[in-house]
Image (tube, rainbow, N blue to C red):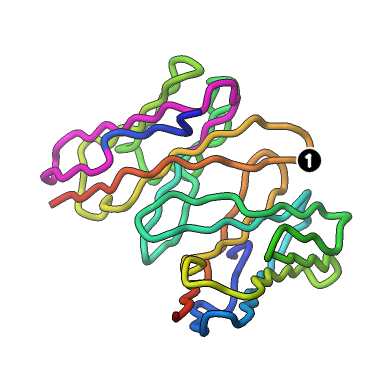
């Protein structure tokens, strides 16, 4: 089992550029979560999908952020245009949502630096 | 308001000592989970305790849950240098988890 796969692992870009982060969840999992982690704000849930459908995007900071899940094995988080305050580590996590049990499996993260 | 607040924010102990971290939360929960994060890595699930359980063990880990006080504690016994990491509690109130700010544990050899 390869676990949750994220790419790229590191991204350095200039303000105003488009950034696309990618995630491959664990095969068989039906829920996918995007988090952002910073020193100031800790770990924040941005959006999550269940069966490829966005369920709660209330954590998405603003319209510059968008996320898609075209199929059960792939999701993207896009920032356009990027700003320096978007610099953070972005994590993708997945799980098989079941009543009373909700362990999440995290990917290694993408460290984004916006100059 | 922040769900799942840990204390202390940082804890430094010697190898072999026990480490205790606490978590408080505000709303009702289905279960509470503890995760570990090594520097530069993703979070790793350690243990889950359901709302109707009071204590759970897994190896050197012991978790307690007091739903009347809306609090949980994580005890790591006989700590090792490899236990150095950040530890987060997460409350499950449905289909999503809400994470606390974490406790940074340093175990000195």
Q: Is residue A75 left or right of residue A11?
A: right
Label 1, on which residue? A100
Q: Is residue A77 left or right of residue A96?
A: left
The answer to which of B99 and B18 lies nearer the viewer is B18
The answer to which of B97 and A82 lies nearer the viewer is B97
The answer to which of A30 and B21 lies nearer the viewer is B21
Pinpoint residue A29: horizontal percent, then vertical percent: 59, 26
Label 1: how many Cα within 10 Å (few below 14, some 14–19, many 20+) = some
Q: Is residue A22 left or right of residue B58?
A: left
Pinpoint residue A51: horizontal percent, then vertical percent: 59, 20
Pinpoint residue A6: horizontal percent, then vertical percent: 36, 34
The chain that hosts pointer 1 is: A
Q: Secondary structure at mark 1?
A: loop
Above or below for A20 versus B78: above
Residue positioned most to the right: B52
Residue at image location 58% in from the left, 56% down from the top: B35
In the rendered image, residue A68 lying in the magenta stretch gets the answer no
Q: Which residues are magenta?
A: A9-33
Residue at image location 72% in from the left, 48% down from the top: B93
Quadrant in the picture for residue A91: top left
Residue at image location 60% in from the left, 82% down from the top: B17
Pinpoint residue B45: horizontal percent, then vertical percent: 59, 50
Residue at image location 45% in from the left, 39% down from the top: A34
Q: How many marks?
A: 1
Above or below for B32 versus B10: above
């Amino acid at each position: 089992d390869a676990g949750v796969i994220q790419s790229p692992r590191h991204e350095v870009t200039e303000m105003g550029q488009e950034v696309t982060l990618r995630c491959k969840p664990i095969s068989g999992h039906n829920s996918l979560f995007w988090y952002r982690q910073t020193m100031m704000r800790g770990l924040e849930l941005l959006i999550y999908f269940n069966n490829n459908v966005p369920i709660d995007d209330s954590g998405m900071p603003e319209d510059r952020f968008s996320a898609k899940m075209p199929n059960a094995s792939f999701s993207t988080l896009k920032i356009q245009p990027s700003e320096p305050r978007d610099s953070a580590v972005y994590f993708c996590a997945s799980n098989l949502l079941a009543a009373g049990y909700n362990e999440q499996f995290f990917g290694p993260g993408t460290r984004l630096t916006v100059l | 308001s922040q769900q799942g607040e840990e204390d202390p924010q940082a804890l430094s102990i010697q190898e072999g000592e026990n480490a205790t971290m606490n978590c408080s939360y505000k709303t009702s929960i289905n279960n509470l989970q503890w995760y570990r994060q090594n520097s530069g890595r993703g979070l790793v699930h350690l243990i889950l305790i359901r709302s109707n359980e009071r204590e759970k063990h897994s190896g050197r880990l012991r978790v307690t849950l007091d739903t009347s006080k809306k609090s949980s504690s994580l005890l790591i016994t006989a700590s090792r240098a490899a236990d150095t990491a950040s530890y987060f509690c997460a409350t499950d109130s449905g289909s999503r988890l809400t994470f606390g700010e974490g406790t940074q544990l340093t175990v000195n050899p």
